[in-house]
Amino acid sequence: MKEIYLDNNATTKVDEAVFEEMRPYFCELYGNPSSMHFFGGQVQGKVTEARKRVADLLGATPDEIIFTACGTESDNAAIRSALEVLPDRRHVITSRVEHPAVLTQCRNLRQKGYRVTEIGVDGAGRLDMEEYQRAIDDDTAIVSFMWANNETGVIFPVEEAAAIAKARGALFHTDAVQAVGKIPINMAASQIDMLSLSGHKLHAPKGIGALYLRRGTAFRPLLVGGHQEQSRRAGTENAAAIIALGKACQLAGEHMQAENTTVKAKRDRLQDALMAAIPNARINGDGAERLPNTTSIAFEFVEGEAILLLLSELGICASSGSACTSGSLEPSHVLRAMGVPFTCAHGSIRFSLSRYTTDAEIDTVIKELPPIIARLRQMSPFGREHLQG
Amino acid sequence: MWDYTPKVKDHFLNPRNVGEIPDADAVGEVGSLACGDALKLYLKLDDSKEKIVDAKFQTFGCASAIASSSALTEMVKGKTLDEALAVSNQDIAEFLGGLPEEKMHCSVMGQEALEVAIYKYRGLEVPEHDAEHDHGHAYPDYEGTLVCKCFGITDTFIKKVIETNKLTTAEQVTHFTKAGGACGGCIPKIKELIAEVMGQQTAQPQPKTGKLSNLKKMQLVQEVLERDIRPMLMADGGDLELVDIEGDNVQIVFRKACAGCASSGNTARFVEMKLRELVHDDLRVQEVAA
């Protein structure tokens, strides 16, 4: 069965060109970039090129890029570093809809005596900027808001939020794992101090990430040891993956226009057709500015895992904010923070497209999903009075 | 992805007996939209009102909830009401070739709907649905003190499920009943209930005061520690080790999270209580230095 892959916010296909770029650095050009000989030196040259490519996508300079193993590592490194360089400040601000890579760490800080404020969102998933302004004070060490939400695609005004943090002397970090490669980013024009990105969300392999660290920002490394990454992240460079990430960032830059036009058009067509064909549905984050590739739709009176497995039978790969798929028992913290009504919180499905998504694939989903929802509603003891007529 | 058996997949993809029975003799409804799964079970009886001749269901929930409901209707058809009441949640899970432990609550929901349907049919009291909090009561027929406020689950119900499924950890109780699966505030209470049920099960009221040979005593103490005590401690990241038994003095040393734990004194008393209950009334537990 050929897959129809609409789960690109979970992970992406490695671009063939990216794979070709990294391929020689396993069996042939396997030197250590830190070595003094020519054999390591030629790898070093490619790592330097990759750093430049990542920086270019972000509107940054190469020395502001630290390669890490994943988005989670970048998030952890950023927040921990901020607390170490501002030891007198004991307050942390984040949002209620962050990825667990940030949220879990912030919540753990409470046990260490930090005050942690989680800023809420409105029904469309938009950050409550007034609550943020009230919460920040001279004790705030770090503010960490995601650039775009992984479940709904809702974009936060992180540049504005960073300026507010700056005015209070706090550091500002953004988890931009879902934003990088999908929307234009220009760090040179922002006051964001730190930014996390992850390779496998933009057609590079898993196991590679990066942390942007604004030049001049004090930093304490998470991993100590060797002098790699200017002593900001010890450990032998994952050269092949770094080279892959560089290529992926270069390609993302080239496809940025298409991402926001052709990919977005496919997303809009999918979402509009499903909303027209299926009654009692709502788009999570409707009305907010969202990523061009993501749509999360909540279907009333049905449960997400059942929808996903029926889609999966047809080769269609999507994701859900429902409880049953994750092993937890409550709907996702993002949907709960948005106050999505409980009649549909369990029945949310996320489709996330990529530049590989075809119109034929969108057509298939538009054809197959409505009967699946109808079938499950037929089976459900709820909603008859709402769905008739 | 969940590791569902072929039978679970079959009953999810081709569910048997979906729908309503308009003139059903018995109807059992459990769960709610807010809880994430719900089942409405319809039973039709024969003329003598003893045997189930037809069963249908409507389910809102995940694949295993739908499969459990489908399995349940197949299992109870042709059974008398008393025979149907003997169907346990393990029977439903076994019929499906097993369920992932995290999904066992789906089989519990099926058994529950069946019980509610039959109780109601027989005119046994079923308390009103209590919609005081967000979720409503998942299992409204179980009176008792509310333990899990998120999912509306009472101590009576939790104790029943612990007993019938021989559960030993709070995590298992969450997998089987959902209790403790949201805010987690009731997990300490769930642990107490596990201890209570375990105590009841094994503490058959026969005073353990007879003469025990040293060898037998040693064997029994070890057995109780392995079976009844260490699994519970380990579930919380702790452990203990038996050092020696001198007369009636059982010397233990706490390990891992229990070592240096502020409440290790309580744990020691709990161990002593269990040993007295299950081995001999004269035993004393003494914590020794590692």
Image (tube, coloured by chain):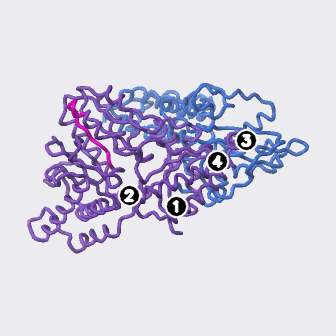
Q: Which residue is mark 1?
A: A362
Q: Are marks 1 and 3 in contact (CB under 8 Å)?
A: no
Image coordinates for residue A286, horizontal then vertical, percent: 48, 43
Tell me the distance, in whole angstroms, between the alpha carbons under discs 1 and 3.
42 Å
Q: Which chain is purple?
A: A
Front disc: 2 or 4: 2
Quarter of the picture holding the C terminus of chain B: top left
Query: According to the image, label 2 marks what residue?
Result: A259
**Depth order, front residue of B118/A249:** A249
Foreground mark, 3 or 2, reads 2
Q: Is residue A265 left or right of residue B26?
A: left
Q: Secondary structure at mark 4?
A: helix
The residue pinned by badge 3 equals: B114
Q: Amino acid at mark 2?
A: Glu
Please give the label number shown on residue B237. none
Q: Residue at x 25, y 43 (%)?
A: A78
Q: Amino acid at mark 3?
A: Leu
Identity of the amino acid at label 4? Gln
The reply to whether the C-beta atoms of the residues labelled 3 and 4 are less than 8 Å apart is no
Residue type (three-letter) at the residue carrying disc 1:
Ile
Q: Secondary structure at mark 3?
A: helix
| SS for dot 2 | helix
